[in-house]
Image: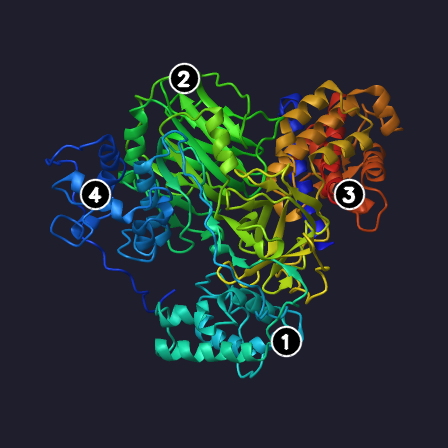
Amino acid sequence: MKIKNQMLALANLSVVRFAAIAVLGLSLAGCGGSGADTEANPVPPPPTSGGNYGGPLPATPEVQAFRTGFWEPALKEAGCDSCHNAGGQAPTFLRTDDVNMAFQQANTVVNQQNPSQSRLVTKVASGHNCWKGNDLAACESIMTRWITNWVGAADSGGRQIQLQEPAPVDPGSRRRFPGPNEPEAALFEDIYKKLDLWCSGCHQANSATAQSPYFAAGGLPENTARVEPTSDAFKQAYIASIPKMNLDDPAASRFVVRLRNEKHNCFNDCEADATELQALIQAMADDIDPIDIPAEQVVSKAVTLYNGTLASGGNRYENNLIALYEFKAGQGLIAADTSGVAPAADLTLFGDVSWVGGYGINIRGGRAQASTTTSRKFHQLITATGEYSIEAWVVPGNVTQEDARIVSYSGSAMTRNFTLGQQLYNYEFFARSSATDANGETMLSTDDDAERLQAALQHVVMTFDPINGRRIYVNGEFTGDVDGAGGGTLDSWDNSFAFVLGSEVGGTVGKWQGVVRLVAIHNRALNLAQVQQNFQAGVGQKFFLLFGISHIIDVPRSYIVFEAEQYDSASYLFHRPKYFSLDAQAMPGNIPLKGMRIGVNGAEAVVGQAYRLLDTAITNDLYSPATGQLLSSVGTIIPVEQGPEFDEFFLCFDQLGTELHPCAAFTPGVPPAPVFGDNASDIGVKLFDAINATMTAITGVSPNNEKVKATYASVRQSLPAVHDINGYLSSHQTSVAQLALQYCSVLVDDTTLRGQFFGGVDFAGQLATPNTTPVTTTADVDLVANGTAVVNILHDKMVGNVQTQPDVAGLTTDVGNLIKTLCTPALGGQTCGGNRTRDVIKAACGATLGSAATLVQ
């Protein structure tokens, strides 16, 4: 009631003010942490540029490809030539005296069939002189890209994926964490006390320097020896701690490694602190029995997510890539540009920006911005071609954001080279050219009625070229929106601007909220086929997981292959399972497959068993040695338990080939963890179509009335799109007021409708008169019988006699005072009578119709 009454007061006040302005002169039709630092690799000396090379020319086209694709960019950025140059440490793959000899040396440490498995890549990925500091994933990606640019992919324009056969591992014999509501969760108590003592300064939600995850949540009260394991604070800390502990190998726990190896905020002595925490985790593990899978179960071999073949960005079109942000680091304040095109326009994270599991950043009012110096490459490389593409995988936080900037290359709120923005349900494309102004206007927007932008993971591409101008693609489809400005040149571009995600430069205006999973800038306009290729490649930390089944069906090198990824910080996405043999000569014959389930850490997952009713057969007719046999086109979500580094997956089959045994007989999995946070309100607001339908039902005015239909079309995108009352904004109330006033205007102007609705009201008579002189407040004015009748009818037909709704006296206070004000010259109104009476009744009607009395549900 308190929330609703507050909303009613605010809504009525807003509508009253809006109605008063409308009556007094506006036409209704016109309303349209501190501590020890982590250890880092030594920073290599500045690289030697290959731009002044004076040695022998490349002897073959392949050496020339090596020079342009790998040698020159590595010399500019990586700094490896400080050791691996002529006369230096072998292999001398960046020697600057002879590119042909460098080529020969590079071939000894490069896998041309699978660049990501090259010795050069695995070396930097393990921490060997990564020129990006601790962002090893960035160095790995860039090195892989340089090698790929050298060895091929020119025809397909992208990275290719080759499945890597995993080592066979039997599932089971794993310890599982008890659920947070199980009594055994109390085993975490001693660990919790230590985390609270050491880590609550940062890893607690109410800390002045709060840092997620909150594994020290709540905190122990002073002089209290024990915290109740049943408390929400204990459960929240326990759930956040599970991915940081390894019950099967406590020394490998992230908590322990963070102290022992990375020297992170040690309490006393890093080694002693790590040993103490390891012993506490070991004590918890000793009290938890490992789970063994019964021998009769029909189960595959086991893999972890990181045992899979990395498929991120596989088969993407990237021939003209000049900047790429994959957000792989997962920590820190820098999001690296992994395009391999110098200079790297790395992004610095400002304000409320956090990392998302499975690659990505969550922007909640902050921004990610490059320097103006490194941003100049966008000006240089794009103006050279006269065309470009902005590509992004995004999850908008909501569909109510207005004038929000997702990706921008700009100088201020009113000057830019390009911007990908959000306006409610629309994507907007600002592009500066000879056909537009310095702000990139007139901007190109997706069609209002199409509602292309949704609060879901979407692939958005915006292209510009001199002939077609701007085009917008969403989820692999051209939206059909036509650029009225046409093409043009980019001569007016400004090279002093900065590249930024989540707001305008500076971060004070244009704020956007949502998750960004990938951003790529190309200095050519992608065509539809290339856009669709990148959409099909997907986004995130994706893997092909190969579950070995040769020990069950006796077909060599046989696997059930899943596409899998860490969907977010709490779940994995498994989809498109297929049968495949890495033996090109093998054929399956005829293999029945029934009831496939996904197991995690020795037990069947509690939720997400989308394949438990699968009933099919793997046959020679359906199997292709090149692509395998698709078993299902659906996907499913599996909860994270210990995190992607430790969670071990396997498959169980009710039947596979001649082996037959029901899966669900073994130990159940861990129940899903509860979600902590503020309780959701038990009331909400109606959505846009429901609001329109409500106003139609109350007033009797047809929604197809020309004036009503036009007003609804103009304000529809500004009406509430979610039921959450906490998301109700002043902009929503303004649009509600416009629509309510239009309905009431049509109602009052139609003599038949108003006679049916306001029976007995004199539409030319008085509504209120002064009761004292002089008049200074509404208390000095009384409603006459005609005005009281208006209020009573509005209450009866719009509010109703419901206990949780305002009573007649409450409505008289709000709407009655509006009538008194508008009918009294001393209060700024005019004496009512004739047309004035009708206008004031419209205002009173609109104030009631657009209030919380009709909006809340």
836 is higher (above) or lower (below) than 37: above
Q: Secondary structure at mark 4?
A: helix
Image quadrant assignment for residue 286: bottom right
Residues at discs 1 and 2 in contact (Cβ within 8 Å): no
Q: Secondary structure at mark 2?
A: loop
The mark closer to the camera, 3 or 1, is: 1
698 is higher (above) or lower (below) than 36: above
On screen, residue 629 versus residue 357, left or right, reads right
Q: Which mark is residue 370?
A: none
How packed is label 2: few (under 14 Cα within 10 Å), some, or many (20 or more)?
many
Residue bearing mark 4: 104
Picture quarter with the C terminus: top right
Label 3 – label 1 distance at C-alpha:
56 Å
How packed is label 1: few (under 14 Cα within 10 Å), some, or many (20 or more)?
some
Q: Amino acid at mark 2?
A: Gly
Residue at 37% x, 21% y is: 433
Among the two numbered marks 4 and 2 on one chain, the one whose residue lies closer to the N terminus: 4
178 is higher (above) or lower (below) than 616: below
Q: Nearer the viewer, residue 108 or 857?
A: 108
Residues at discs 3 and 1 in contact (Cβ within 8 Å): no
Label 1 – label 4 distance at C-alpha:
60 Å
Picture quarter with the N terminus: bottom right
Among the two numbered marks 1 and 4 on one chain, the one whose residue lies closer to the N terminus: 4
Residue bearing mark 1: 184
Q: Amino acid at mark 3?
A: Leu
Q: Nearer the viewer, residue 600 or 378?
A: 600
Residue 632 rendering spot, x and y as whole percentages: 65, 42
Residue bearing mark 2: 487
Residue 384 rendering spot, x and y as whole percentages: 29, 24
The mark closer to the camera, 1 or 4, is: 4
Residue bearing mark 3: 811
